[in-house]
Amino acid sequence: MDEALAEGEELVNDLSEGQLLTLIKEKNWSALSFWLRYHHPKYGNKLELTGKLQVEEQPLSSQQKELIAKALKFAGLGDDSKLTDNNEQEST
């Protein structure tokens, strides 16, 4: 079933590309715009973000340490004594 759906999608994509190229040859503005927007970086959709990122380091609370330790233990990546021991050593 998946193969049949993939083949059908490929067929529709081929037909659509053929129609799009025909419309471009006929100087259809929407077709031209569509093609350029998705195939030429100069005409693509743009989003510009500017800003400043400021990170303030804050020590973990004992409750946060406990939750992280439980998550690590649950994931099989360690036991809770490692997290507690490392944080206690760093604070001394």
Image: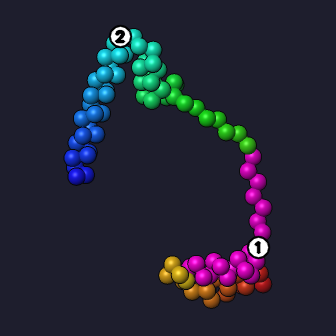
Residue 59 - label: 1
Q: Residue furthest front?
A: 1
| 85 and 34: which is toward the camera | 34
Q: Which residues are the magenta region?
A: 52-72
Q: Is residue 3 above or below residue 16?
A: below
- Amino acid at the residue labelled 2: Glu
Left or right position of 7 against 88: left
Nearest to N terminus: mark 2 or mark 1: 2
State yes or no: residue 64 in magenta.
yes
Q: Position of residue 68 (x, y in %)?
A: 63, 77
Picture residue at 70% right of the left edge, 77% below the top? 64
Left or right position of 10 against 52: left
Q: Position of residue 10 (x, y in %)?
A: 26, 38
- Amino acid at the residue labelled 1: Pro
Rendered image quadrant of residue 36? top left
The residue that disc 2 covers is 26
Picture residue at 41% right of the left edge, 13% below the top? 28
Q: Position of residue 24 (x, y in %)?
A: 37, 16
Q: Do we see residue 11 in this rendering?
A: yes
Residue 44 - label: none
Q: Position of residue 89 (x, y in %)?
A: 72, 84
State yes or no: residue 17 in magenta.
no
Q: Do we see residue 40 in this rendering?
A: no
